Image (tube, rainbow, N blue to C red):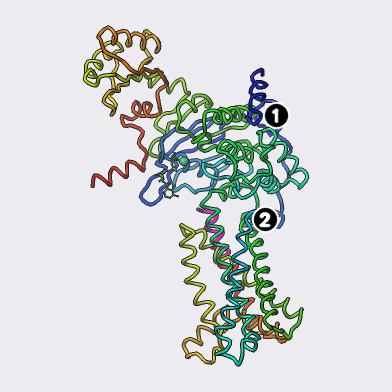
């Protein structure tokens, strides 16, 4: 078996899938190279989970085709299933069972005999720091432990392709880092990982390539570097003491940075992109210049930060509309009626 | 990794992923052969047993409910329909055993719906095993609950004076027939568990099906006392055939026609609803 094959792990063309009126997938194309982490980045309701479920053979697409390691997800579902593993967004182990029981159960279903299954379960629990909790019901686990047992259950058979649907949503920074370390280890052993996330920094940290998803379509695709440089590598966030000074601050910033400045809903806040491709200065130097200009103009800044563009800002740049989830949009439409 | 040791010293419970430990579990081993259909189903049945072990409250439905049914109906109808509760019990106990167990079958649908709602079936459905295994295993677990419920009712019945003429063999065959039918009938509920949105709607539909099925039968009274149109329904009702068969074997006799109908109904339920269930299960 050639685990480090250089071909494509996933090839999807024009996938569509609707739920009643909702078009969850509206012609999604994906090409995921084998042996890498591939990030699907998008807001709530973008269609990430639907895409993962189609690719993992759980849901039939209405249209389009998808192949996993060359096998069609509809007509050769069984072949696909023997090579993939899914850690769903929600419970993917049995909460009433203990950690050990869950892993032994799944190992047995994968064909291991009882002693081998027990051995495998114990080894995984140890590697994931869950030995102490192995005889506790999973419903009593913390969020981070939950995620770890979910992932452990998915690599019982070291799959060739692992789907991780929002593996760090709701985790604290430390648990998040632990999951990231695990993902890095998994991919370094030759497993391809398709990861969905709402966080640009997560995709940036882990993924070799990213597809930005909106309304069931891929609206941008590339390496994290490519995506960020199309958006600008950073954003300055400012909060003023006096809301009356905001128009003046906006002008000063625009001159200093030579980019459009956004006025946030908060009457004292402004944001602007820095580090755009083609600028002569890097992001931090531009930010420093802006801060200096503001001080000289007598504008008092209470809070200042320079960070990566948020998913919101990426969206704004790519689509000219903010990253509103489909559900929120529905609510707004409803309200407008 | 110097900071590994310091973190570990400060708070021993903090997990620090170690590349070496992960490497040992990530090394691709030989893929074991896929388990047999029966093996996979039994493994899923083992899951049902573990759930009973961890959530014993779920046995309440199969113990308390049947006991209440036996006591309630024996004393409620016993005086009116027969000379004494004790006499009525000889006629009635097989019927109430069937009613209780058939009613409990709906928990198969409720349980499946809950599992799907929680997401665990997504994992099961991506496993490369015999497709119906997860559902068959689940019903295997439920069959144990049916047997338990039947035994509880038998116990209460014996205590109240039920004296089956068929003896141990008759009673065991009666419970056997009941379990065969209940296994088959459970597939109706797996289907509803898959197509309905919530646990509540599964319960609602079950009640609508189960009440007419169990009450419009020969469980409580002889059909000859009913109007003609009702007799027609009662006669084809599978619960009637089941009760007639069970009553006969427990009394040490036999009712070949009822038993044949019963087995035909059972095969029909598995065939029709098993197929529908698997169709839905495969294309959600
Ligand atoms: N089973 C379903 N029935 C009805 N609508 C659905 C179903 N699954 C998804 N949808 C709808 O399809 C759209 C896409 O959903 P999906 O779960 O794929 O989004 P997502 O990107 O995973 O979002 P999130 O970040 O919230 O997990 C949403 O509008 C959602 O409401
Ligand atoms: Mg999702």
Secondary structure, magenta segment, majority class: helix
Q: Horizontal placement of A253 versus B78: left or right? A: left
Residue situated in front as seen by the camera: B19 or B150: B150
Question: For residue B21, which numbered disc appears in the image?
Answer: 1
From the top left corner, tell me how far across and down residue A89 is, in percent: 51, 41
Q: Chain of mark 2?
A: B
Residue at the image point whose x is 72% and y is 78% from the top:
B171
At mark 2, the secondary structure is: helix
Whether residue B112 is in magenta: the answer is no
Query: As drawn, is B120 to the left or to the right of B253?
Result: left
**Which residue carries the number 2 mark?**
B53
Locate residue A69, reporting x and y percent.
Answer: 59, 37
Q: Tell whether label 1 touches label 2 (CB within 8 Å).
A: no
Quarter occupied by the N terminus of chain B: top right
Residue beneath the point at 60% across and 93% down: B83
| Start-end of magenta stretch | B274-284
Mark 2 vs mark 1, foreground winner is 2
Looking at this view, name the residue that lies furthest to the right: A115
Q: CA distance from mark 2 to mark 1?
A: 32 Å
Instruction: Check if residue B276 falls in the magenta segment.
Output: yes
């Amino acid at each position: 078996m050639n685990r480090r094959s250089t071909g494509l792990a996933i090839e999807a063309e024009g996938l569509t899938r609707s739920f009643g009126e909702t078009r969850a997938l509206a012609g999604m194309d994906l090409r995921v190279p084998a042996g890498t982490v591939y990030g699907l980045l998008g807001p709530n309701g973008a269609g990430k989970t639907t895409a993962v479920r189609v690719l993992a053979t759980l849901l039939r697409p209405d249209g389009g085709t998808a192949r996993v390691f060359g096998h069609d997800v509809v007509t050769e579902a069984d072949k696909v299933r023997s090579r993939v593993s899914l850690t769903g967004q929600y419970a993917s182990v049995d909460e009433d069972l203990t950690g050990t029981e869950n892993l032994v159960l799944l190992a047995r279903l994968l064909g291991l005999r009882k002693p081998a299954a027990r051995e495998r379960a114990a080894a995984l629990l140890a590697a994931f720091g869950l030995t102490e909790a192995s005889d506790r019901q999973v419903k009593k686990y913390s969020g981070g432990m939950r995620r770890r047992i979910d992932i452990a259950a998915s690599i019982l058979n070291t799959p060739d392709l692992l789907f991780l649907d929002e593996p760090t949503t709701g985790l604290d920074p430390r648990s998040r880092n632990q999951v990231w370390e695990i993902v890095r280890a998994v991919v370094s052993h030759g497993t391809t990982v398709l990861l969905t996330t709402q966080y640009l920094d997560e995709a940036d940290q882990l993924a070799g390539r990213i597809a930005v998803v909106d309304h069931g379509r891929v609206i941008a695709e590339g390496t994290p570097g490519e995506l960020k440089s199309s958006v600008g590598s950073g954003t300055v966030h400012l909060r003023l003491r006096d809301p009356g000074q905001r128009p003046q601050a906006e002008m000063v910033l625009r001159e200093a940075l030579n980019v459009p400045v956004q006025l946030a809903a908060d009457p004292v806040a402004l944001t602007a992109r820095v580090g755009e491709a083609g600028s002569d200065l890097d992001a931090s130097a531009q930010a420093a210049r802006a801060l200096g200009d503001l001080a000289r103009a007598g504008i008092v800044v209470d809070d200042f930060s320079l960070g990566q563009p948020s998913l919101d800002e990426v969206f704004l740049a790519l689509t000219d509309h903010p990253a509103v989830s489909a559900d929120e949009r529905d609510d707004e439409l409803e309200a407008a009626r | 990794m110097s900071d590994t040791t310091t973190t570990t010293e400060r708070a021993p419970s903090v997990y620090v992923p170690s590349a070496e430990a992960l490497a040992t579990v990530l090394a691709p081993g030989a893929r074991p052969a896929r388990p047999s259909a029966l093996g996979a189903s039994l493994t899923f049945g083992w899951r049902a047993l573990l759930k009973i072990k961890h959530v014993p409250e779920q046995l309440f439905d199969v113990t308390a409910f049947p006991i209440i049914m036996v006591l309630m109906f024996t004393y409620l109808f016993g005086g009116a329909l027969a000379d004494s509760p004790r006499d009525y019990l000889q006629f009635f106990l097989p019927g109430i055993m069937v009613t209780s167990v058939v009613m409990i079958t709906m928990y198969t649908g409720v349980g499946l719906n809950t599992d799907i709602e929680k997401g665990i079936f997504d994992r099961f459905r991506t496993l490369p095993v015999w497709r119906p295994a997860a559902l068959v295993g689940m019903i295997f677990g439920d069959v144990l609950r049916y047997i338990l419920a039947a035994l509880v009712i038998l116990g209460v019945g014996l205590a109240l004076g039920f004296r089956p003429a068929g003896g141990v063999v008759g009673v065991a065959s009666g419970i056997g027939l009941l379990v065969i039918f209940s296994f088959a009938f459970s597939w109706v509920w797996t289907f509803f568990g898959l197509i309905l949105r919530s646990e509540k709607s599964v319960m609602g539909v079950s009640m609508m099906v189960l009440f007419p099925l169990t009450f419009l039968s020969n469980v409580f009274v002889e059909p000859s006392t009913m109007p003609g149109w009702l007799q027609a329904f009662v006669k084809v009702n599978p619960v009637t055939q089941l009760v007639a068969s069970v009553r006969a074997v427990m009394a040490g006799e036999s009712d070949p026609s009822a038993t044949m109908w019963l087995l035909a109904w059972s095969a029909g339920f598995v065939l029709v609803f098993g197929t529908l269930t698997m169709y839905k299960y495969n294309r959600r």
